[in-house]
Amino acid sequence: MKGTFLGEFEEVVLLAVLVIEDEEAYANTVRREVEKHTGRSINLSAIHSALYRMERKGFLNSELAAATPRRGGKKKRYFKVSGQGTNALNEARRVRESFWKLVPITKLQGGVS
Amino acid sequence: MKPPKLPLLLLRLIAGRQILEELEGDLYEDFLDNLELKGYRKARNIYIWTALCSLRPYILIHNKENRKLKFIDMITYHFKMAIRNMLKHKTFSAINISGLAIGIASSLAILLFVLDQSIKDDFLPNKDRIYRLESSIERAGKIGHSASHHGYLMPAIADNLPSIEAYVRMNKSNETIVKDNNGSPELIEEDFISTDPDFFKIFGFEAILGNSKEWLKEPDEVIVTESAAKRHFGDTNPIGKIIQFSDEYTKPKRITGVVKDPPGNSSIQFDFIATTEGLFQPDLSFKSMFSMSTPVYILLKPEIDPTYVSSRIAPELKKHTDKKSITESTYKLSSFNELKYNIEVSDKIVKAVDRRVIYMFSIIAIFIIALAIINYINLTSARSIQRAQEVGVRKVSGASRGTLLNQFLMESFLTCIIALPLAILLLELIIPYFEIILEQKLFFNYKTNPLFIGALLGGVALIAFIAGFYPALILSRFKLSHFMKGSFEHSSKGALLRKILVIFQLTFSISLIIGALLVQNQLEFIRKKTLSYSPEHIIVVKGHFGQFSRNYKTIKERMNQVSGVTKVSVASASPGDDFYGSMRTKAIPVSIVNYFVDEDYFDIFNLKVTDGSSFNPKADSLSSHVMINQALAGVLKEENPLYSTAYRFRGRNNSKIIGIVEDFHFESLHSEIRPVVISPASSMTPALSQLIIKVETESFDQVVSDIESIWNEFHPLDIFNYQFLDDKLDRQYSAEYKLSKIFGLFTMLAIFISSLGLFGLSTHIAQVKVKEMSIRKVLGASFHQIIVLLGKQVYLLVAISSLIAIPIAYYSISQWLQDFAYSGGISSWAFVLTLGICIALTSLTTGWHTIRTARTNPAESLRNE
């Protein structure tokens, strides 16, 4: 199903939003979370792009929050994972696990060098 | 610590307001975080980089609050308004567009020509190290320059001047080759450069067949270009083939190599490269009788100062000779890059274009564009009054001044964008004509050069901006309150500027008209005034050196029998030739030109013998008899040199001066009349290379074909090479004719653009003043009074412009005329005629509207009030 497909990066970003949802997920916090878990350094603009794209796809809802002085008086946008977003995450997980079940354990051994 | 502002500007331009706020906030927060952790420099760099990375398409689309962007919206809106406005005022739009199109097209044509000059020879790898040797010497108080040097000059000194890497002696000539088409010979004329082996070392023309280092070592070798090889030998391998020449003095030559054709932007053009036989003599020296002079081109080693080398030449020469003409000359190395502009010293190899002509063309190009821009500015700002309403309403609805500025600039951009393709189309139409005038193909291909196209678009945008800015400023300045009060109607501020601009336009056009007329006048003067004969009735048949040495009497007799031919003369030269060769003798301080002619020459050219007698037609004149012209008589020391035998003009013995001839113009009027010695034909028969035939007939074609058949009887292996003398004379002034034609062309264009402007302006005046005139009419003004009222302004402008233009034109033309030793002067009729043309054109362009306005029925124009 095109449009509901979740890219790898999108999946990670979506998961990050899910994890920090309660303590207000916006671009900067999402990035920190993603960097923490993947160990990669990510440009803020990539996070922006993913967030706004997924919002358009309907995986995320958002609302504006008040401005703070630390932001130079600019408002920020908080993101929340929507029902559709949760479904997409579940679907992605299901696909992966159905694969994982099929992979023989022996084939995974010795893969790391 | 604050982040830089610049990166955000782009973001602000394209992002919607809401998303922009969020992005900016996030970026700022990120910047502060990084500032604490990594310091200012790093934080700033990350900030800039992130801002640039944020320029992604989604920020255009993602705009919840206002899905369509304001920026794009306004552009489409302005675009729509501009198109509507242009369609509404079709006349003005047409004037603006066509003016700009013509302006751009003609400037582009000139630009292409100028560009061609600047990219001449840019393919030559060594061109910055190539020089031409030039010498100058003072003779009779005048400094004479020369690019030709004694054949032994370079061999004598080259060994002692190690800075010289290589040198060549070069000559260019036109040879007739006999191509053998299976028994039926065909004659083909080809350009030959005869030179030394190092030619290919200096000018890196690419070899196709053969090794260029081995070429031209033997005297009979010749190298051929790719296309000439194809012409003569088709697709067969030309190496080793022999080419035959039509004249018996040139030995057959053997092809040993093939080079690529010289590119179109090469100064050096040729079909064949051959050795210079005369220069191959092993015993060549300054003493040898044979002294062929040729241009010399030198390749210096890298980073050698040419002035140092040239200063060493004269001292080196003193070791070899004491000939004053050689040792007392001043030598100079002229950079190859400069030769294309050097008209003072020239050779047959590199064609030079006067740098002043290039400057003049560039100025004309800029001015023509300026004319078109002025049209736009004048018409648009003049109409601002009519558009005040529109501006007022827009302002009330909330348009800011910036928005209005954008809108009007958009209109000028649109005008230019429509004009551009028209201009390109026009350019393609004028290029063939332009190439005919220039007598050269334009080399630069602008269509495939992205840099040129980029610059063109940039230039057009600049034109649009210049043209649109002032009207936009004026238009956006209107205030609704002024409009309501009615105080905008007769603002005189803009009117003054418009008048100045019109005066500028008219001044330029009037100067051009006067200039074109005076150039024409000088050319007429050259053609008609100075000649004592009518050149259109004289045919010159040219042969090579020695062509008629054996049969000149019989061939003359046969030609005389052709019906329509009234007189025939055999001679060494005819008017319009480069002089046949000058000489110097010890007793006479100036160099003298030698002509060999028979007795009929004087009749054909109407030369008056002022003293003594002409050559005796009955008996063969004694070969020791000569005639001289008055210029020479003035130089000789005797009061009356007639019958003097004190001078040796030729050969071993002194000659007797039997007659003095009135001065006559044989060379172009650029130079003064030289001292001339005229010797009888029989005294040096190989020099007789021309038949001069006077024709009195209605059917020239018949005479020419009769002459040709006689020619073929005598010289079947030579090309019948004939010319009417008037054509030949015109060729002397080909640079001037080119100039006058181009002048004429651009004058027409300038006049056309200016007339468009006047027409537009008069249309506007008529529209604005129609009510005023109607009221005047109602109050009793007559038709004539109204015509005068409407017209006087325009004619006043014409008068002021003429006053400015006349001195400008007078000055420039008198400068140009200084190039001629003899000029027809500046006649006042050109100024009168120009004034007449101007008044006629003004009346033509403005008359229609003036009369229509004056005749308008007041009831019609006033009924709306």
Image: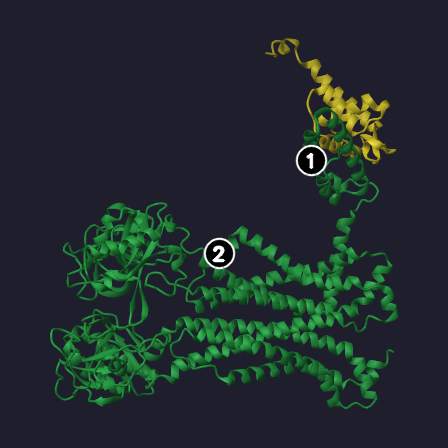
Chain colours: A yellow, B green
* Label 1 crowd (10 A; few <14 / some 14-19 / many >=20): many
Instruction: Please determine whether, in this image, residue B842 is positioned above or below residue B164.
Output: below
Residue at point 48% right, 79% down?
B518
Residue that carries the numbered disc 2 in the rendered image: B445
Say whether residue B732 is visible. yes
* Residue B595 percent across, percent down from the top left: 22, 77
The chain under label 2 reads: B
Nearest the eye: B717 or B262 = B262
Q: In which image quadrant can residue B297 be found?
A: bottom left
Quarter-of-image position of residue B703: bottom left
Neighbour class for label 2 at 10 Å: few (<14), some, many (≥20)? few
Given residues B383 and B322, the one toward you in this image is B322
* Residue B190 as seen in the image, left or right of residue B351: left
Q: Is residue B373 above or below residue B588?
A: above
Work out whether B774 lies above or below B401: below
Circle number at residue B577? none
**Residue drawn at point x = 34 percent, y = 84 percent:** B531
Q: Which residue is mark 1?
A: B48
Q: Residue B501: x percent and y percent?
A: 66, 71
Residue B426 in sight in this render: no
Q: Chain of mark 1?
A: B
Give me the residue at 48% from left, 62% from top.
Answer: B113
Q: Secondary structure at mark 2?
A: loop
Q: Amino acid at mark 2?
A: Asn
Q: Quadrant of residue B412?
A: bottom right
Give how far across and how far down residue B726 sits, in percent: 35, 79
Helix, strand or loop at label 1? It is: helix
